[in-house]
Amino acid sequence: MSTKVAIIGSGNIGTDLLIKIKRLAGDELETVALVGIDPESDGLARANRLGIDAVATGVRGLVEHPRFDEIEIVFDATSARAHEYNDSVLRPLGTRLIDLTPAAVGPYVVPPVNLGEHLDVPNVNMVTCGGQATIPIVAAISRVTPVYWAEIVASIASKSAGPGTRANIDEFTETTSRAIEQVGGAARGKAIIILNPAEPPLIMRDTVLALVGEDRQDQIVASIEAMVAEVATYVPGYRLKQAVQFAKVEESMSTLTDAAGPLWKVSVFLEVEGAAHYLPAYAGNLDIMTSAALRVARAIAAHKVKA
C-alpha cells in the first residue's frame, strides 16, 4: 500500500515535487493534496489537471481535508517563517514533516551522508539546494582527512528562484553554513548564494573550497568521485564540471583556521542540470532539492514498512 503524502507550497519547488512523485514514485507514494494560498497559482491548476486535490486555504485547509487522517508525510515547500507555523499546526497531530525550507526546525538530512540517522524523527530539514549539492562533497573530503574550513558558492539562475527562495537568502546562508559543519564535518563553514540574471539562464553551478592539513590527493579524489556517483543515482544531472584541484597554501590562514600550516586547498567545481519536470533544465537547484526530499520520503516509507 502506498504512503499518503501532501505538499504545502504551490510554487516552483512544490510543483516540481508534485510532478516527480507522480512520475518516479507513484507505486510508493500517493499525493493526496497540493496546498497553497493563491487559488490562481499554476501549481494548483496543474494539481487539478493531474487529478490531485488542490487546496487554496493553506495548512488549515489541509487539516480540514476529508482525507487528512490518511496523510502520513507532509512536504513543506513554503518559506522558513511559514514552516514554523505549519510545524506548530501539524506536528501535534502526528504528521511527519519533510521541510524544504531553511527553517531548520528539525535535524539536517543530506541523503548520501546521513539518510538513515533520522528516519523516526517528526520533522527533518533538507537544508538548502546549495547544501544538498555541496555538503556531500565536504563530507567526502572529511571522511579522508579533517577539513578545517569549507566554503561553498551556489550560483543559480535568477529565473529559477521563486519568492520563497528570495525571501530566505539570509536563512539560506545561515542554515547551509551550519550544515556544512554539522553534516559535512568541517570545523568551520561558510555559504554564499548568487542569483545569476544571465540570459539565457545558466545551469546551476556550485563551488566547494576546503582547507585540509594532509596531502592525500588520490584518496580525496577517489572519495569525491564516489560521492558524486552516489548523488547522481537520484539526481542524474549532478556531475563534476572539471577535475578536482589542489594547491599548497604556505602563508598563514589564521583568519580562517587555527590549524598550523602548511595546508592544502581543495577546489571542487560542480554542475547540476535539472530533469526539467517543471522548470527547464537550468533549474538544477529545484531538481536537487526535490529529488533529495523524495529520496528521504521513500526511505521513511520503506522504514515504516519494515518496522
Image (tube, rainbow, N blue to C red):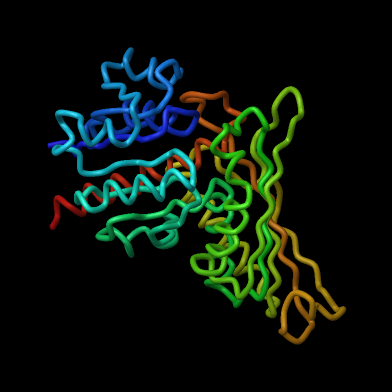
For residue 189, above or below residue 5: below
Q: What residue is shown at x 56% (from left), y 65% (from top)?
A: 178
Is 96 in front, or is 150? 96
Residue at the far bottom: name it.
260
Image point (53%, 58%), residue name: 136
Q: Nearer the viewer, residue 63 or 274?
A: 63
Point out residue 33 in the picture as x, y percentages from the top left corner: 27, 28
Q: Which percent across, then down, holds residue 53?
A: 26, 22
Q: Residue at x 68, y 47 (%)?
A: 193
- Residue 257 is drawn in which quadrant? bottom right
Relative to residue 77, is residue 269 drawn left or right? right
- Please state, as top left, top right, bottom left or bottom right, where the C terminus lies in the image: bottom left
| Quarter of the picture holding the N terminus | top left
Farthest residue in the right direction? Answer: 251
Specify whether 245 is left or right of 30. Answer: right
The residue located at (70%, 76%) in the rendering is 215
- How far across and how far down the image is residue 78, in percent? 45, 38
- Horizontal and vertical percent for residue 135? 55, 58
How many numbered callouts?
0
Q: Nearer the viewer, residue 222 or 168?
A: 168
Closer to the camera, 64 or 281?
A: 64
Left or right, 280 with respect to 304, comes to right
Q: Is residue 106 above or below residue 154?
A: below
